[in-house]
Amino acid sequence: MRARKARKARNELRRSRRDEPLPKVSVTLVDDAAVRYLLGMARVAKRGKARWLGDPSLLELLPFLKRGPHGASRLDPRFRERWLLLRDELRAQGYTVKENSAFRSRREQEDLIRRWQRRDPAVITEPAPPGQSAHQYGMAIDVTIDPEDYDVLGELADQFGLLQPDLEEDPVHVELPGWRQLIKGWSERRLVPL
């Protein structure tokens, strides 16, 4: 039934003239169908069966497709508890908080290193080698806050048992102190959604 409505909406979209506004219901159905189609493509791509997709950078262009089974970001539960308290406190103080990067697989860390080597302006500091980043264990997050006051981020992180290790070079990074001692016996299955 829903697929039939989406098809009807797509046909209306094709028939409509540029100067005619589309009914909101039609636009919503087309958007919903497109999102479901793209999410399906992402699931196929993640299983490695998407040779027809071509360049894997498609997932970089559409970052919402990279979401794991539990959402966009996954974290170690010990880190997550503290981070949520810190985030809530920042918001209570009037900051807008945007979570940019949490868990990264080894492959994503290697891709980040390659982007750094190509001098990608979006990568603000040299990434740690694979296996040496708290992100690979779900024990770090990169955030931006507005207004930009990363001194406050570091001070509040300390209050909640977190660490902002490098205010000068990587002010957006917050991690769990002592994470290297906690990764013995680590498993990605223990990560929880943010």
Image: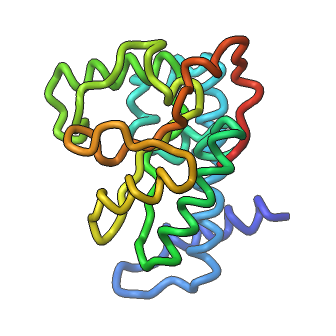
Q: Residue at x 35, y 62 (%)?
A: 152
Q: Residue furthest front?
A: 159
Depth order, front residue of 5/162: 162
Query: Which color scheme is applied?
Result: rainbow
Counting every numbered tag in the picture gives 0
Residue at screen point 69% across, 39% down: 78
Q: Position of residue 40 (x, y in %)?
A: 66, 39
State the image quarter where residue 97 is shown. Answer: bottom left
Q: Position of residue 63 (x, y in %)?
A: 46, 44
Q: Is residue 160 above or below residue 101?
A: below
Does 52 sit above or below residue 37?
A: above
State which quadrant residue 193 falls in: top right
- Going by the image, does 123 lie left or right of 71? left
34 is higher (above) or lower (below) than 183:
below
Residue that sits furthest to the right in the current view: 1
Which residue is at a point 54% across and 27% down the rendered structure image? 178
